[in-house]
Image (cartoon, rainbow, N blue to C red):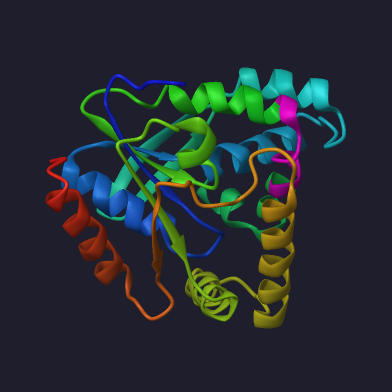
Amino acid sequence: MIVSAVNVLTLDGPSGVGKGTVGVSMAKKLSYNYLDSGALYRTLAVAAERWDVDLNDKKGLKKLANNLDISFQAESASTIKPFLDGEDITRELMLENTASKASVLALYSEVRTALTARQRLFAISPGLIADGRDMGTVVFPDAILKFFLTASVETRAKRRYKQLLLRGDNVSLPAIWRQLEERDKRDSERNISPLVPAEDAIELDTTYMSAGEVVDALMDVVMVRGIF
């Protein structure tokens, strides 16, 4: 059992469920550190493309994962910017192609082992909000509180579509919907660290909830548990 020295709260769930927005907001409210584990996998996908590391080269990917120069900086109450080698790579991480590549990389045990070790380094004082797909089951099994967020694929696709349109991207709702379904299948059926709720996780369906309503609901649980 991995035991963290500080309080860790985990937010797991599929892509597009709102973990990022909710996680950053909760971290701000609690003055905790924040980890977007998905960003690490997407950053690795970007780095692999930049340094011409083939997605089938597991040894090369593991070496790259062990040496990633990645950092996060808060931009607003609900946004954190990722940096690779000091360069803001927010736009690259938002690309659907990057997300699809990251989902493939997540299938490799060598990559997951390397990045799991990196993720645990984020558990420092005063505490950590960690969002991903296996935060409560594998990376932080000792977390003091675990949440698993869900939403219909239709809702998640529409949220993602709106987000990308506002950013000025030329996107297709049917294409996004299809990509989410493919990613859900790949994430939930993989042999290593599949996307499943931890046995002690609190599950919340966010299909008909705004981000603010989700934050309020989760913070109510945090306060009732006397964690903060």
Q: Seen in the image, is 168 located left or right of residue 112?
A: left
Q: For residue 44: magenta?
A: no
Q: Quadrant of the C terminus?
A: top left
Image quadrant where residue 105 sits: top right
Q: Main secondary structure of the magenta part?
A: helix
Question: 222 or 176: nearer the eye?
Answer: 222
Q: Seen in the image, is 76 located left or right of residue 12?
A: left
- Residue 86 placement (x, y as % from top left): 49, 29
Residue 59 visible? The answer is: yes
Residue 69 visible? The answer is: no
Q: Where does the magenta region start and end?
A: 103-110
Looking at the image, is 73 positioned above or below residue 173? above
Question: 80 or 103: nearer the eye?
Answer: 103
- Please tell me which residue is depicted at 62% across the width and 18% down the height of the picture: 67
Q: For residue 109: magenta?
A: yes
Looking at the image, is 178 positioned above or below residue 202? below
- Residue 82 placement (x, y as % from top left): 47, 40
